[in-house]
């Protein structure tokens, strides 16, 4: 028997084995299709109620109907405000003064903690005495690698900002003077001046004002006192943005009276906007303005009119700001959106001061 014959016999045997069941045995898998169903009738006594094939739900009329489902919205934490203690602030020619209703030791501790959070890693305090704290230079605008290399080559390093805090306790309160100066490597530092001469220094001073007011209000630290309404209308969030507590269930007329008393105007229109000046004096993109050039001695000369392309040269007083009324457990709050400005903390501070003074 040759090899081909063996292969042929093997293939035939395998085919016969696989199909053997269907060849030698009858397939009864479809017999059910020819069978007739058995139908039986339920016999019940005469006069009984007819049966119903239905689901009976007890107290079905007491169950409320389901409402259509809505798209799921990720829950977000409510905007949290913290009450503040009234801290007096005065801008002098050479300093900004805070009148803190606390002892000198407590005021120094609050400032030290604030500087630690502002500086980050390392020690923020350069020298400290009984009545003064001097900080190390703060670098609010770190250089890129290329800029740092260029400074190393030219030996011209950027100026950094250092602060000085002087404390004087008077009748249980502390008069704190805040100053700053620019310090530059290989250059003699300038004298101490007021933070309002520098945008970064002024922003830090305003943020410190909110931090002091928040830290001194002990009710912000205890959950049992969260419902207590502070007498000072200015509240602050963790980002240093301020808001005004209006009261409970404030009506539109009451809101308008509060804004009017503070010298704030509601801008007519669909969007809720307000401004520190009348609506007709608000600066907007597209306004026709004068193009002036300096001619010396503080004077300017007009060349021609141009359309305003941006608001970079417009002060905070001439702008309009979106606002909203936020309802919290502690009451209704006026929240002014100042995120479009370069220094939101400063703009927010200027706006809320109108409700204090």
Image (cartoon, grey):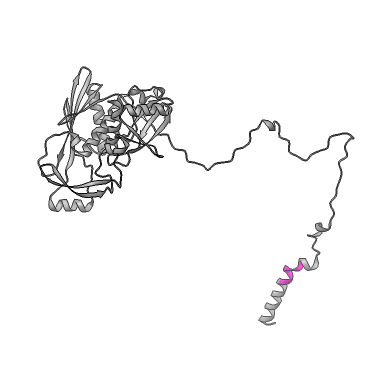
Q: What stretch is highlighted in magenta?
A: 15-20
In the picture, residue 174 is in which quadrant? top left
Residue 302 in picture, x, y percent from top left: 18, 47
Residue 167 in picture, x, y percent from top left: 18, 25
Q: Quadrant of the N terminus?
A: bottom right
| 268 and 233: which is toward the camera | 268
Q: Residue furthest right?
A: 46
Kindly tell me whether residue 135 is visible in this rendering: no
Q: Main secondary structure of the magenta part?
A: helix
Residue 340 in picture, x, y percent from top left: 32, 42
Q: Which residue lies furthest to the bottom in this view?
A: 2
Q: In which quarter of the image is the C terminus?
A: top left
Q: Is residue 217 above or below residue 148?
A: above
| 79 and 14: which is toward the camera | 79
In the picture, residue 36 is in which quadrant? bottom right
Residue 350 in picture, x, y percent from top left: 27, 33
Q: Which residue is drawn at 73% across and 69% down?
A: 17
In the picture, residue 104 is in which quadrant? top left
Kindly tell me whether residue 61 is visible in this rendering: yes
Q: Which residue is drawn at 25% across and 36% down?
A: 203
Task: Determine if the magenta segment contains residue 247.
Answer: no
Q: Which residue is drawn at 30% across and 43% down?
A: 284
| 258 and 237: which is toward the camera | 258
* Drawn side of residue 139 relative to residue 220, left or right: left
* Drawn side of residue 208 relative to residue 128, left or right: right
| 317 and 51: which is toward the camera | 317
């Amino acid at each position: 028997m040759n090899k081909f014959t063996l292969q042929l016999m093997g293939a035939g045997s395998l085919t016969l084995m696989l199909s053997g069941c269907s060849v030698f045995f009858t397939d009864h898998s479809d017999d059910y299709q020819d069978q007739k169903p058995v139908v039986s009738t339920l016999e019940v006594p005469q006069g009984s109620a007819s049966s119903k094939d239905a689901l009976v739900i007890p107290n079905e009329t007491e169950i409320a109907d389901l409402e259509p489902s809505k798209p799921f919205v990720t829950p977000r934490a409510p905007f949290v405000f913290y009450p503040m203690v009234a801290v007096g602030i005065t801008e002098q020619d050479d300093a900004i003064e805070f009148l803190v209703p606390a002892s000198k030791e407590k005021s120094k501790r609050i400032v030290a903690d604030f500087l630690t959070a502002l500086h980050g890693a390392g020690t923020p305090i350069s020298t400290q005495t009984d009545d003064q704290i001097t900080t190390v230079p703060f670098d609010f605008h770190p250089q890129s690698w290329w800029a740092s290399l260029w400074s190393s080559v030219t030996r011209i390093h950027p100026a950094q900002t250092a602060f000085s805090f002087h404390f004087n306790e008077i009748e249980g309160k502390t008069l704190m003077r805040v100053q700053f100066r620019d310090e530059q490597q290989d250059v003699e530092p300038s004298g101490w001046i007021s933070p309002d001469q520098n945008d970064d220094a002024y922003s830090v001073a305003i943020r410190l004002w909110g931090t002091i007011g928040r830290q001194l209000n002990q009710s912000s630290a205890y959950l049992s006192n969260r419902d207590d309404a502070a007498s000072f209308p200015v509240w602050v969030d963790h980002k240093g943005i301020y808001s005004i507590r209006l009261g409970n269930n404030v009506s539109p007329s009451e809101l308008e009276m509060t804004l009017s008393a503070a010298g704030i105007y509601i801008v007519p229109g669909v969007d809720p906007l307000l401004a520190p000046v009348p609506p007709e004096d608000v600066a907007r993109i597209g306004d026709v303005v004068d193009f002036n050039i300096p001619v010396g001695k503080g004077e300017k000369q007009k060349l021609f009119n141009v359309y305003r392309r941006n608001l970079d040269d417009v002060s905070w007083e001439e702008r309009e700001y979106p606002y909203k009324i936020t309802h919290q457990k502690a009451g209704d709050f006026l929240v002014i959106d100042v995120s479009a400005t370069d220094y939101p903390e400063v703009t927010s501070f200027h706006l809320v001061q109108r409700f204090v003074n």
